[in-house]
């Protein structure tokens, strides 16, 4: 088994993920936010009253993972869950006032992170990169349903 047989693409994507996580964890530390919570905060901000199941679908994670993340975020006063009046089994998720202010700050931090990450790219390179990543994502999505993998 030779790990050098893997393409450079997957090595670089793995390294990118690690470094991105380290930078974001450090940048978000003072806000008591985990990098994995940022997308969830943005989703809830754009969709007040969203269900846990819908968050899970949008983030491509399990409902139980969402529940654990929301519990932690509730402890930090970032979200509140309320029972759906029409379906008592469903919980609707809302940002607290504290989180609404934080989301604005996080949005600016993430836009700055994106800008700095792509600062040496031309507009055409960014567009090409996005298209290539979409192609790869489409391949990966197809693999989720492929029994031969």
Image (tube, rainbow, N blue to C red):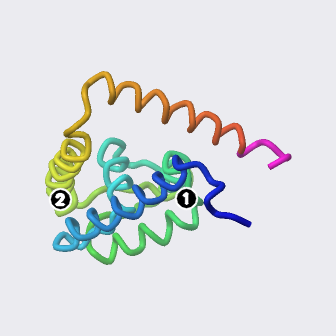
In the image, is residue 146 part of the stretch drawn in magenta? yes
Residue 53's spot in the image, x, y percent? 55, 53
| Residue at which label 2 appears | 102
Residue 31 visible? yes
| Prevailing SS of the magenta stretch | loop
Q: Please identify the residue farthest to the right as the structure is shown.
A: 148
Where residue 88 is drawn, which disc sits there?
A: 1
What element does badge 2 sit on? helix
Q: Depth check: 28 or 9 in front? A: 9
Residue 149's spot in the image, x, y percent? 80, 49
Residue 85 visible? no
Give the residues in magenta.
Answer: 144-149
52 lies above or below 144? below
Q: Residue at x 64, y 36 (%)?
A: 139
For marks 1 and 2 on the same chain, the one whose residue lies earlier in the sequence: 1
What element does badge 1 sit on? loop
62 lies above or below 59? below
Q: Is residue 129 left or right of residue 120?
A: right
Residue 87's spot in the image, x, y percent? 56, 52
């Amino acid at each position: 088994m030779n790990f050098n047989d893997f393409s450079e693409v997957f090595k670089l994507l793995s390294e990118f993920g690690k470094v991105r996580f380290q930078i974001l964890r450090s940048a978000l530390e003072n806000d008591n936010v985990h990098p994995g919570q940022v997308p969830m905060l943005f989703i809830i901000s754009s969709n007040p009253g969203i269900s846990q199941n819908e968050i899970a679908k949008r983030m491509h994670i399990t409902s139980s993972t969402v529940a654990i993340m929301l519990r932690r975020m509730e402890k930090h006063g970032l979200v509140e869950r309320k029972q759906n009046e029409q379906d008592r089994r469903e919980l609707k998720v809302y940002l607290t006032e504290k989180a609404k202010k934080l989301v604005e700050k996080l949005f600016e931090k993430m836009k700055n992170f994106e800008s700095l990450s792509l600062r040496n790219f031309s507009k055409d390179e960014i567009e090409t990169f996005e298209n290539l990543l979409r192609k790869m994502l489409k391949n990966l999505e197809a693999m989720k349903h492929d029994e031969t993998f």
